[in-house]
Image (cartoon, helix red, strand yellow):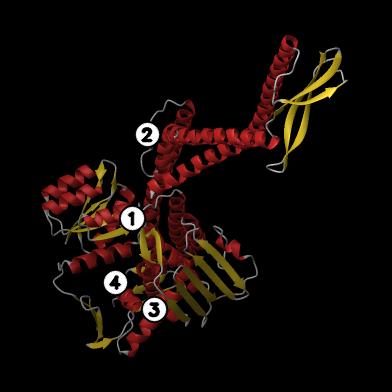
Amino acid sequence: MVINLKLINKMKLIKRTYLHTLLWMIPILLIGILFSFLIIKYVAYEEIDEFLTYEMERLVKYHREHNDLPNFHNLVQVIENKKLEAPVFKDTLILEPADNEMVPYRQLWFSIDHNGRDFTLVLQHLMLGRDDIAQGALLITTGLALLIVLFALLSVNRVTGKIWTPFYNTLNKITRFKISEPVPEFESSTIDEFNTLNSTLNSLLNKVSTDYRHNKEFNENASHELQTHLAVIKANAGELLGRGFKNTEQLEQVRKIYSAATQLSQVQKSLLLLSKINNREFTDNIKLNIEDTLNSVLELFSETIDIREIKLMVQTVPCWAVMDKGLAEVLLNNLVKNAVKHNVQKGYINIKLEEDMLEIENSGELFTGKPESLLQRFSKGKNGNSGIGLAIVREICDLYHFNLHYEIYQTTHKITILFRQS
Amino acid sequence: MKLLIVEDNLKLLEAITETLKSEKFLCETAIDFGTAHEKIFLYRYDVLIVDINLPDGSGLNLIRETKNQNPSTGIIVISARNSLDNKIEGLELGADDYLTKPFDMAELVARVKALLRRRNFLGTDIITFGDISVNTASRKVFATNQPIELTKSEYDILLFFFSNPNRVLTRESIAEHIWGDNMDLADSFDFIYSHIKNLRKKLTTAGVKDPIKAVYGVGYKLETD
């Protein structure tokens, strides 16, 4: 799982690098083609012009020595009685009968004096066509670009794998990190940025870990000290209650002390549970069947349901969820308790458990407020109950990323939980 | 019956001791690990009641020691840490029961008596009260030898009363006895009322005198004449 994750991430990083490298090749390719085209064209002109100039000089020299013209196949035209001051280069297209297409030629026009008469001679040479040059430029540049890309990719692949190794090691460690476990040691690397990342992560994780431990200790201490003294109050108040009073006022006062101590203890237990859930202290996650937990919770409340003459409809199939066993019990207990507690005499409860969804619908008192407000801590109910049960439900759903939905239509309350982890 | 109570809070220790003495148990106390450790070595106890959090050691070690010295001793753990870990560890080491602070004294008495019955220290499974008798092994109730059908909660409540005769049981403690932490106590009084009403009705229908007396504003009491 972890290795897979690493691979997928690696793919992403390298793929991104590839993509960017390739995108940058496009302007290089375009500029390269244009550049090669111009260079080739320039060089071709230079060469042909130079060649034609040599031919002209040879011809002039031959004419001076022999007073005649040699049999020159490059000499295509002799025009009488025409004199040019200086030699002129010209481009021209000539129909090539074999291919039946126009082919570019370079011509050199120059004049000589033969027996007192002026002659203008035209030398010509086949030129590279623009399409030929373009083709060449394209081939050269593309070939070169392909080579560059190939080597770039190969080196990116090798280098990225090597350079990013410390990063993936770190990533691997923090994805496996659990809050209750010691902070992982990160290897030091030769790259400054990774060292900074590691040391920053390290101090962050240390802080988180210390906070977690302090929070846990505080919870335990607060719990221990409070509950012990509450036990003393309850024991003594209970003792007084048992003795009985002639004076009902005194009895009432002791009863208040006793019941306040009892409620305080309950609230404290609930808050402690919330705090522990928030502090992620429940890490013993197993794959468990919600159906079994639901059935045992329903068993616990069966008599209470009978006393209220509540019509219970239960439809269940096995439903597997990965969570802490204790929290699963707390979750279902609070849901069922809520449905029983806030029900009416001769009401109903419909429970539907599907493969990844639990739906509890029950009759209740008319409620006009917002359903979400009932999921808040200490939202006071009609008879002053602390209303922490549903807050715990919400906290557990948040912890496991279960989708919790609460709807109320007048006297019908419906809670839906999607166990599929989003 | 000889009990050793280990608890570092003196006030709570006194309250527990007073209650258990009133039930005619022979109680010895230890306020820290050292004293408790010494007493376990020197004497035999039928029941050890031990707090896990002690200033100079862990109650879990006392459980270990007791199991070594005298395996027949029944052990009840009392702890304020309702962390599941402690509970499981305590029970794995051989503790018989676990109570979370703050507990009701009536609950502690009921647990001690249930433990003694399970360990067969009392010699019988049958508790008789007036014309009513309860067989704790088969969970059957008889009114003048005629069986009465009780629901689970009704049976639990009746046995709770039988374990605490003449002691006022608050509605809170009865609720906690039946549901533990699974019910908000303030909301459960209606249910307690219904359960007790039904229980009384079943007893009187069976022709026995209803021994449960309501204590106004507080709870109920099983009265001996």
Report the Cα–Cα distance between label 1 and label 3: 32 Å
Is circle 4 on the same chain as circle 1? yes
List the residue tagged with mark 3.
Answer: B196
Residue neighbourhood size for the residue with mark 2, other residues' Cα within 10 Å, grouped as few (<14), some (14–19), many (≥20): few
Report the Cα–Cα distance between label 3 and label 4: 16 Å
Residue at disc 1, secondary structure? helix
Residue type at numbered disc 1: Leu
Residue visible at 53% across and 76% down? A362
List the residue tagged with mark 4.
Answer: B165
Residue type at numbered disc 4: Pro
Q: Nearer the viewer, mark 2 or mark 1?
A: 2
Report the Cα–Cα distance between label 4 and label 1: 32 Å
Residue visible at 60% across and 62% down? A372
Report the Cα–Cα distance between label 2 and label 1: 31 Å
Chain under disc 1: B
Which mark is first along the chain, 4 or 3? Answer: 4
The vertical placement of A92 against A118, above or below, is: below
Residue type at numbered disc 3: Ile
Mark number for residue A388?
Answer: none
In the rendering, at what x and y percent does residue A108 appear?
A: 76, 22
List the residue tagged with mark 2.
Answer: A185
Is circle 2 on the same chain as circle 4? no
List the residue tagged with mark 1.
Answer: B84
